[in-house]
Image (cartoon, coloured by chain):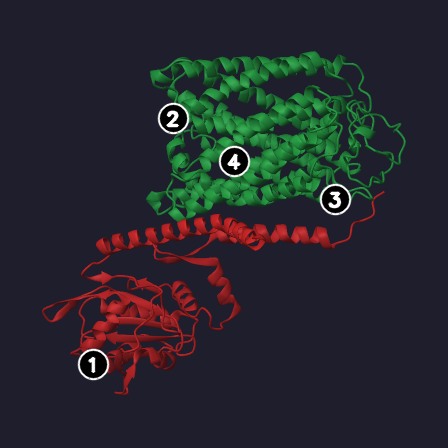
Amino acid sequence: MQVSSPISQQVSYLEYQGKYKGLLGWITSTDHKRIALLYMFSMMVLFIVGALLGLGMKLELIAPGKTVMEAQTYNAFFTVHGVIMIFMIVIPGLPAVFGNFLLPIMIGAKDVAFPKLNLISWYVYILGAILVISSVLFGDGTPDTGWTFYAPYSFKTGTNMLPAIFGAFVLGFSSVLTGLNFIVTIHRLRAPGMTWSKLPLFPWTLYGTGWIQLLATPIVGITLILVALERIFGIGVFDPALGGDPILYQHLFWIYSHPAVYIMILPAMGAISEIIPTFSQKHIFGYKAIVVSTLAIAFVGYFVWGHHMFTAGMSNTSQYAFSILTFLVAIPSAIKVFNWVSTMYKGSINVQTPFYWAVSFIFVFMIGGLSGLVLGALTANVYLHDTAFVVAHFHFIVFGGTGYAFFAALHYWFPKMFGRMYDPKWANTGWVLFFIGFLALYGPMFYLGMMGMPRRYYDYLEQFHSANILSTLGSWVMVFGLVVIFVNLFRSARNGAPAPVNPWNGKTWEWTVPSPPPVENFDRIPEYKEKEGPYEY
Amino acid sequence: MQKLRIKMTRFTSLGPGIFFTLIFLSQFFDARSQSNVIDDQTKNPEIGIVEHLDEFLPKDIYLIGEDSQKVVLTDLINKPTVLNFVYYRCPGICSPLMEGLADVMNKSDLRPDIDYQVLTISFDPTETLDLAIRKKANYLNLVDKKEEIARGWKFFVSDSASIAQATNAVGFKYKRTGNDFLHAASVMLISPDGKITRYLNGVYFLPFEFKMAVVEAGKGTSGPTINKILQYCYTYDPKGQTYVLNVTKLAGTMILFFAGTLFLFLIIKRRRKTI
């Protein structure tokens, strides 16, 4: 791909010295790339906390009865684990880190449309995170409702719910601001010649995600505020004792939280759609089909929330409607999988770490998606609802989908972000360990759920013991894999070999600017001249 | 052969659609019939109100009005109509109910006889028109807007057949005990085409819910725009038996409105040239 500007002579964003030095220079910078890294490092810290909590839960479940913690502690663990992982990592994850870093470069802009707002979003994110963490550290007991804050328990429990609820509310604001920023950026700042049909797929998914963030997040904001008001003033919106309706809470919560699954997964799919053509050295198969299915997922994803509530009290008609819509939303996802696989067909495949992650993404995402259809079927749902099967399903989607795509994206764009190559041997070792650990950790949960083991209990019947041991062992292997991955990346960011401009022979614009990119990305705004779109090999 | 194949293909592609529609409908009606059985068992009291929402009033209910003329009830209903059943010599809740009606008519900014009318019917067939007229004069003493309310609030008596038909049609259940009756206090809102649109139970009515019920009954007829907005923003809560602000609907509309505005702005307004 040709870019009209020569290689930039500007100083890289990592070395740039602005008004302030050191940490202050970072936390006051409105450079989208620095903000992306701010997000990345804050998420990494939170991820370590969330992962340790998950590890603790699995350790408790290594044997029936009390092993290392009390029931109440276990409740607190799964609540805080869920809140951190969902609200602070997988929802903002890919858009905030890779979206921020790459969107402007991929569309030929110097920054996002509202750089200051972008920085404010990060501060709002940090504020939300602090509020949630404070609910753990202060007050009368750690929240124990699960990440869904279901009414009426969420306003009846004596634990310290308010900071957690406000925290989730504040985090929602960060999400809305980022979504708004991206939508405007994509509409307004595309370089000349970059029409909608030539927009790379990752920005396309960020666009779809932006609208979901903008439309759906306010609903959960309002809902959480209502729960808070219910707790403080007893206004009776959700409390049946006061004439309220707890089912209404579930509706409102899932009207946001189901589309939120697509906030997580769409950018993940976008990243995979960038990686597969690069490592197949072939034009993406069915560009338009992928774009349309992205928008279709974003749209249909709004109408399936009821499938979380099949057993909560709902008319037969609603159940049928939600079930059929749930099956429908699988179609665009399947189209994407078909397109990725077809892209690889007869491609010149270059097997590197990002490609391993991308292919394993497809594998685990398929398992997650297909088990979602099992849960979307009404009769199966009655049996499997609230069992370990559900936990396995959403970890395959959320962690298997978004998590794998995050690591795929991290290994793909790492040379661009830090200007260093990582050690592929250790990176691959990390991936193998993670993959084996992941399957061993979450795979048995499908079995356990089908055998009837409920979720969210610190205890279980003896008959579930062996599968739980396998699951716990899997958690250790997976975490060991994570340690290998992180250590390798940290070491490489400092000491790795300098990365060339385009180590993978990618075709999108981020591979035309130096690694790491200069402060303003381009000396002057490039002009898009490719006729066949962004993946012409 | 080719044509047959095309037909077969068409049929097979329609097949699943028809199949799902049939399942849908069968379940829908199944659910409805089940709920009706439950209704019959639990909601058929001897005294009280069995709501017959969305049903039409029969066309052969005859009443005798203040001018001694015999009229058909549905002929009188040409605007949103508040219907209520009392007996004029009632020592119990009829008087508070009638006072409540007088009070809300007096307070409401809706104009009696223009925006709506109130028809009060005695369900005691032995009562005379004379008593009805005296009672009306009595209740008019409670209000300020005497002339308007006199025009818009009409009192009737009727024969036992029409009374039975009318009270059955609206689900007003009562029982004679000696000289008196055991009965509930409620008013029904009837749309201009004779459909029962709402029940307001109790003896005291808030001007707001009274207005909402009248506006709702007048659906389809022209009214001030503000009434349509009110109707959109408020829904009837059957448990609380009042109109409530529909927060979720409003919030959803506002979110969609702002998102739509943003989208249109981004699409329509031309891009600024960037350097």
- Whether residue B175 appears in this view of the structure is yes
Vertical side of A429 occupied by A309: above or below: below
Looking at marks 4 and 2 on the same chain, the residue that comes earlier in the sequence is marked by: 4
> Are callouts 1 and 3 both on one chain?
no
Q: Nearer the viewer, residue A234 or B77?
A: B77
Question: Do tag 4 and tag 1 residues touch (Cβ < 8 Å)?
Answer: no
Q: Which residue is mark 1?
A: B131
Looking at marks 4 and 3 on the same chain, the residue that comes earlier in the sequence is marked by: 4
Q: Nearer the viewer, residue A135 or A335?
A: A335
Q: Nearer the viewer, residue B214 or A478?
A: A478
Q: Nearer the viewer, residue A537 or A146?
A: A537
Decide if residue B117 is on the left or right side of residue B267. Answer: left
Q: Which residue is mark 2?
A: A454
Q: Which residue is mark 3?
A: A197
Looking at marks 3 and 2 on the same chain, the residue that comes earlier in the sequence is marked by: 3
Rendered colour, chain A: green
Marks 4 and 3, how far apart in space? 40 Å
